[in-house]
Image: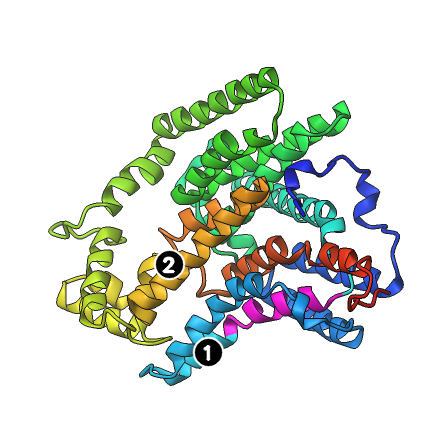
Amino acid sequence: MNNSFSHVVIPQPLKNIFIIRDTLANKISYYHLLLFLVSLPFDRFYSELVLISFSMHTLLHLRRLRFPFLPVRKLLLVLSLFLITLFTVLYTSENEEGLSKAGRQLALIIFPVMFVCTKLDLNKYKHQLFLAFSLTITLTVIYLYYDALHTIVYNKLLVATLFTPAFINQNFTAPIELHATYMAMYVCFSLLFMIYCALHSAIRVRKVLYLSAAVLLTGALVQLGSRSVLVAAIIGANCILPITISSVKRKIIYLSATITGSAIVVIGITTAPVLKSRYISGFRQDITANIAIPTIPEPRMARWESALHVINQHPLLGYGAGAEIPVLKQQYFKDGLYISYYNELNAHNQYLSMAVTSGYVGLAVFMLILLECFRLALKNRDVMFLSFLVIIAVASFSENILDLNKGIFFIAFFLSFFLLSDFSDNFKVVNELPGRATFERA
């Protein structure tokens, strides 16, 4: 069955996010997922609490599973991310930190397992859940701008101060205590979804609202200062979303608009001194390995070279979960990267981090998981799945996104959702086959 997201009829009343017609158990499951997405940008306590509650509710209303029909291959794509870490715990020298990392990644098991156990038809509510998440991020961005402007007015500063280092990158997300890269990932996904909704909305008022939200999120993405995520947004808007447009005329109009918009963003970045320093000068600094002139932070490429040196000492299986920072610190000191040593910085690259902790074997598995997910997304022409994968693949070059709660939850939820949301559709088909074992439905 082709469950391409590009074939879903998008426009629905906003009230459908909060009011659904389903069984009581399914409504509770839906509201759990809704609350999880709404709480994701905020303190992890709330998202963890909702996840625990959702798991308990799902297990209490567990449907009778028919194991021959389970999507084992898709399940393994998500579970393998956790299994890599679990395997490396066996030989790590940092047992406590290794177990802690495995504990943080438990969501990579919980979400896929709960999604195949729940009676809720996930595919049916995909649009409502994604829209709820995108609206939450949009409102959060509005709050961040309000907080920044309130601070500027209170201190009697110029409005132009908004575009100074005091309100760029981590300083912009400081009020909600969220790392700027993770917020940028959330904003990027929401931006692309809002554009997608605008493309497929037949109601002019909604189209205008979606586009207005997209403009606001674009500004926030630039404000957040994540180069890798901005690149992912440009790729998604100009290369992936056009797939859903069947009319050649509409596709030309859309590409003219997005390419022009992308050009305006790039020109704005290259002309505004603060943004140019963050995006252009910062990038040049990052890709140089020359540490003759001390910089804060030290060049990212220099840290990557240290990581490669560490990897080559244990290339097959790496050093084990939790050992990345201790072994890198030793190498930083040898290489004269004293700022990185003092601040105990990780590789800031998920691919190198995988190689450090699990060797080239673990890195190969990680790459194969990404490639298989890309294959499935392309096969189904699922533009939002493709957009999500591009965000993950590109952001992994600049951040260890599987180390912290907010990155793990983002990947665990959406990867599991995209891969397993059609499972309920599959067992509905099985019900109709005569003489075959069937699934129970509420």
Span colored in magenta? 104-118
Is residue 173 among the parts visible in the rendering?
no
**Residue 204 numbered tag:** none
From the viewer's perspective, is residue 393 above or below residue 90?
above
From the viewer's perspective, is residue 403 above or below residue 246?
below
Residue sitting farthest toward the left:
292
Gap between marks 1 and 2 measured at Cα: 18 Å
Q: Residues within 10 Å of mark 2 (few under 14, many from 20)?
A: many
Q: According to the image, label 1 marks what residue?
A: 100
Q: According to the image, label 2 marks what residue?
A: 350
Q: Amino acid at mark 1?
A: Ser
Q: Secondary structure at mark 1?
A: helix
Could you say where residue 178 lies in the image, as x and y percent from the top left? 52, 56
Q: Amino acid at mark 2?
A: Gln
Which quarter shows the C terminus? bottom right
Q: Residue at x 63, y 56 (%)?
A: 417
- Mark 2 or mark 1, which is nearer the start of the sequence? 1
Count of number-bearing discs: 2
Could you say where residue 133 lies in the image, as x and y percent from the top left? 66, 49
Q: Secondary structure at mark 2?
A: helix
Q: Residue at x 53, y 66 (%)?
A: 76
Q: Residue at x 44, y 46 (%)?
A: 169
